[in-house]
Amino acid sequence: MNFLSSIEQKREGKILAPEQIQNFIREFTAGKIPDYQMAAMLMAIYFRGLNTAETTALTLAMRDSGDALKFPKDKRPLVDKHSTGGIGDKVSLPLAPLLACLGFRVPMISGRGLGITGGTLDKLDSIPGFKTLLPAGKIVDQVQKIGCVICGQTDRMVPADKKIYALRDVSGTVPSIPLITASILSKKLAESLDALVLDVKFGCAAFMQTRTDARKLAKAMVALGNECGVNTRAILTNMDTPLGRAAGNWLEVKESVACLETGRADLPVSQAAQQRGPTDLLELVLGCAALLLVQTRKAKSLVAARKRAEDCLNSGAPRKKWDEMLIAQGADLGAFNKKLALDHTAPVVVELKAEKPGFVSRCDARLIGEVIRDLGGGRLTKESAINYDVGIDQIAKPGERVGKSGILCRIHATDRIKAGVASRQLEAAFTISTRRPPAIPLVAGILP
Ligand code: URA
């Protein structure tokens, strides 16, 4: 094939035929097109864009570059949630067992973190013995048996995306709406889903910094997902502030388990609810579950769906399902529970204190993400090793009152020097005001 002429066509803003796109994805996956030519094509797409038909062709060609998961017929719908990524975004962890208990099958194929954004697989890797690399047969078996799995892509799933994403990462072509759409949806379509919720983040720590851009991306993905036969909806959520009160791999697992707990029976309801973890995390977990219940017609309205999801969570069944999932994926439950009982697993914990009393009016998720990455909790390159124990917890959120010397957050570090550096950097992440700032809603919209 003459790939050069396709690159030139796209460089000139012309429309590529579906067969051209199918051909070059097939040839590139087979190693017959060199990286430098594909990088040129990606840059041409970055500047010239792709129309809907081209994006559909690219997505389907990428999906078909490998094997899709195949599930036996079953009355339980196959569903998943995908987030475009942020700081403290651990929704997938409590959501998968909750959905399984609501009567869904959840083949949640997740990714690793890069840069400041955390990755679900890295969080799960902090659980003793837990395996995230599973063969396709085991993924299907586990979903059929217990209802959910959270694991990585197999080598045979969507290999085109693996190669193209690696190239985009080093060629400045990541933030392109058609390329992000094709990358995310090709992987989700390979899960053979009935319904999908996309959590598209906007804000200082998100891919899409503005709500307008996030809406554009969400619209493109929702349209394409539905066109490809998967009932797809998107939820637009704010990522100026971390989700929950903890960010960092193990600290996020702890917070996710707290979200699944039913609360202590010996405490008054309001205190018991606090034991369950932060309300914004709970809101998003229940919001995603409710959407999927409506999308699959298991509930008639979002209000009824949310109540059903809440009742299910309150029953304690999802907490038991979490343990079932851990055991199925090789975790050492005894070691996990021992680790869970510890206040911290990093060698050093330091409190960052407010210099004056007032209301938290800013808690900058981007700065917090950068600090966690520099503490060793994130990757600078795909090859970097990460430390699972470091991170930030007890984060004070916008709108909350703090006294002088009140805790703004705790820093979990490998040594005192690193904790000191992080502490100085984090001072800039918080703003304390004399007046309570207006509340900013977590969910800014739902599409369609
Ligand atoms: N996540 C993906 O899987 N692909 C992208 O292009 C961006 C985020």
Image (tube, rainbow, N blue to C red):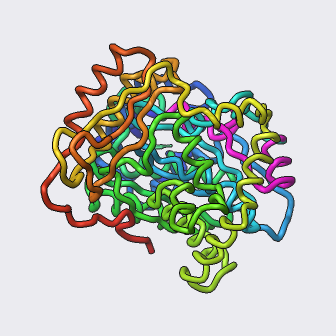
Please indicate, yes or no, whether residue 9 appears anywhere in the rendered image: no
Q: Is residue 234 left or right of residue 400?
A: right
Q: In the depicted view, which residue is nearer to us: 43 or 209?
A: 209
Q: Nearer the viewer, residue 211 or 265?
A: 265
**Residue 12 belongs to the span the image colors magenta:** no
Task: Give the residue drawn at x 43%, y 71%.
Answer: 446
Side of 316 relative to 198 (left or right) = right
Span highlighted in magenta in the image: 138-164
Q: Nearer the viewer, residue 173 or 211?
A: 211
Percent coordinates x, y for residue 374 in the rendering:
36, 23
Q: Position of residue 154 (x, y in %)?
A: 70, 35
| 164 vs 170: above or below | below
- Residue 323 visible in the picture: yes
**Residue 139's x, y, as percent?**
78, 44
Q: Is residue 125 above or below residue 416?
A: below
Residue 29 position by quadrant: top right
